[in-house]
Image (cartoon, grey):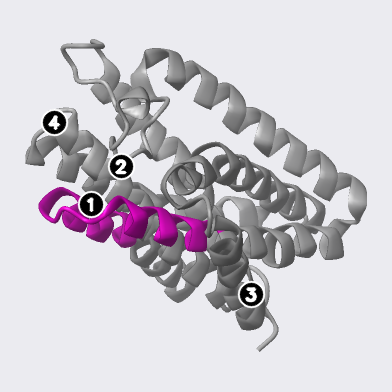
Amino acid sequence: MAEVVEAGLWGFVAGSALLAGAVIGFGVRVPAKVIATVMAFGAGVLLSAVSFELVGEAFDQAGLAPAAVGTLAGAAAYTLGNVWLARRGARHRKRSGRHAAHAQPSEEQRSGSGTALALGALLDGVPESAVIGVSLLDGGAVSLVTVVAVFISNVPEGLSSSAGMRKAGRGKGFVFGVWGAIAAASTVSAVLGYTVVGAFSPAVIAAVTAVAAGAILAMVADTMIPEAFEDAHLAIGLVTVCGFLVSFGLSHA
């Protein structure tokens, strides 16, 4: 029971970073270059965590085939969900709205886009939280690197997205309701990652870890890096590498 509670607490900690970022992004006009820089750093952190904590762990547990198949399946599932949501107004859900071409639509411009934005946030957040719960299965201790990576990446995600929602005319109730619900969903997702996945064999656990890794990697490439590149393209490579090295250092500390 204690480990189930721990999984939920760590999931909530990671998910609450989205809410914290949303509060900052909605209430403070953060310069676009700052958002882009933090987004690039978060992308680098997640790329390292996916490589060494998720895909690497899946490979060690079950070999190349389950790791590769799971990663591809996760990326494919995320991409299909993302395409469906993009057609309903959630294509630029991570964008701050600084550029008109990449602005989030208002409900008047695209009916149902608010629901699509909420579902998109759920699609982005659930795989990250699920692997936090799964990481507890390996020796009964949560992967601190995974928690840190998700937390660091979630702050700029919530910040940028809520800034875009504000510019699209969405109110405080909608913005904080969405991110509060995602924080709650992150808690549940981490608990389910521990309780449900833990009942399966190591090969299945490895495959599930790889699926989450594929979804996260696709999310980074599709939503985080484009937002970072838009306003900090001259420094994005260096900032992303710094984030990667921070996460790499934590993995090998």
Q: Which portion, as a residue range, is magenta?
A: 16-43
Instruction: Name which residue type carries label 3.
Output: Leu
- Horizontal arrangement in the rendering, residue 244 relative to residue 119 (left or right): right
Residue 245 marker: 3
Q: Quadrant of the N terminus?
A: bottom left
Badge 3 vs badge 1, beta-carbon distance below 8 Å: no
How packed mark 1 is, by other alpha carbons closer than 10 Å (few <14, some 14-19, many 20 or more), is many
Mark 3 → mark 2, Cα distance in angstroms: 26 Å
The answer, for residue 165, to whether it is visible in the render is yes
State the residue position of label 1. Answer: 22
Q: Secondary structure at mark 1?
A: helix
Magenta segment main secondary structure: helix
Instruction: Name which residue type carries label 4.
Output: Arg
Task: Please provide percent x and percent y for residue 118.
Answer: 31, 32
Q: Where 161 falls versus 5 (above or below)? A: above
At x 45%, y 66%, the residue is 7
Of mark 3 and mark 2, the one earlier in the sequence is 2
Q: Quadrant of the C terminus?
A: bottom right
State the residue position of label 4. Answer: 170
Mark 1 → mark 4, Cα distance in angstroms: 13 Å
Q: Where 252 falls versus 222 (above or below)? A: below
Residue 161 marker: 2
At x 51%, y 26%, the residue is 82
Mark 4 → mark 2, Cα distance in angstroms: 11 Å
Instruction: Name which residue type carries label 1.
Output: Ala
Residue 168 in which image quadrant: top left
How packed mark 2 is, by other alpha carbons closer than 10 Å (few <14, some 14-19, many 20 or more), is many
Q: Which tag is nearer the camera, tag 3 or tag 4?
A: 3
Instruction: Name which residue type carries label 2.
Output: Ser
